[in-house]
Image (tube, rainbow, N blue to C red):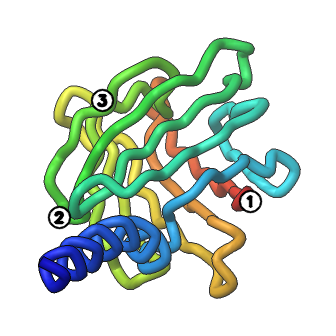
Amino acid sequence: MKRLLMLASLVVLTVLSSGPLLAQSNPQIGTWKLNVAKSKYVNVQGPKSGTRTVEAQGDGVKVTTEGVAGDGSRIAYSFTTNFDGKDSAVSGVGAPGGEDAVALKRVDANTSTVTAKKAGKVIITRRRVISKDGKVLTVTGKGTNEQGKPFSVTTVWDKL
């Protein structure tokens, strides 16, 4: 009986500690605040504010973004995805360019690529890089705006 109790305790401790270990192995996990002053936008309007929360979800992540767009409208969208390059649906309002699907691929522990689509057409490609100290996320992106003109974006996010 004593061995069974000890085994059960070990299983419980293992399960409880696995979440934090997963978060430590994925530097994207956490809450990020948009640093508007360090971000740059060419041929597209940037947001006034933004907060991104990344949570471990199975083998992938759930990303929730909230804020205020440059025109004052609400930003509140999310998606859950794996890093397998397959499209995942984006739900909510205010996603950049009206994207309705994203596909992520992991390059290395601190780098990933994102392909964003609207109605099946690629509208934005991004590269996300987390600094070695894990405190800054820089996202560079290129795409075509609604008028068909090319644009580029560099957003800088600080980990809270």
Callout 2–callout 3 Cβ contact below 8 Å: no
> Against 46, is 24 above or below?
below
Graded by Cα atoms within 10 Å as few (under 14), some (14 to 19) or many (20 or more), the crowding at tag 2 reads few
- Whole-percent x, y for residue 48 in the image: 78, 30
Which residue is rendered at x = 50% and y = 62% of the image? Answer: 29
Label 3: element kind: loop
Amino acid beneath label 2? Asp
Assign the C terminus to one quadrant of the image: bottom right
- Whole-percent x, y for residue 55 in the image: 43, 52
Amino acid beneath label 3? Asp
The alpha-carbon separation of the residues under discs 2 and 3 comes to: 17 Å
> Which residue matches tag 3?
100
Left or right: residue 90 compared with residue 137: left
- Whole-percent x, y for residue 152 in the image: 58, 51
Which residue is rendered at x = 76% and y = 53% of the image? Answer: 39
> Which residue matches tag 2?
84
- Whole-percent x, y for residue 41 in the image: 70, 46
Q: Name the disc covering residue 158, or none.
A: 1
Label 2: element kind: loop
Label 1: element kind: strand
Q: Nearer the viewer, mark 3 or mark 1?
A: 1
The alpha-carbon separation of the residues under discs 3 and 1 comes to: 25 Å
The alpha-carbon separation of the residues under discs 2 and 1 comes to: 26 Å
Assign the N terminus to one quadrant of the image: bottom left
Which residue is rendered at x = 62% and y = 16% of the image? Answer: 74
Graded by Cα atoms within 10 Å as few (under 14), some (14 to 19) or many (20 or more), the crowding at tag 3 reads many
Amino acid beneath label 1? Asp
Which residue is rendered at x = 21% and y = 74% of the image? Answer: 5
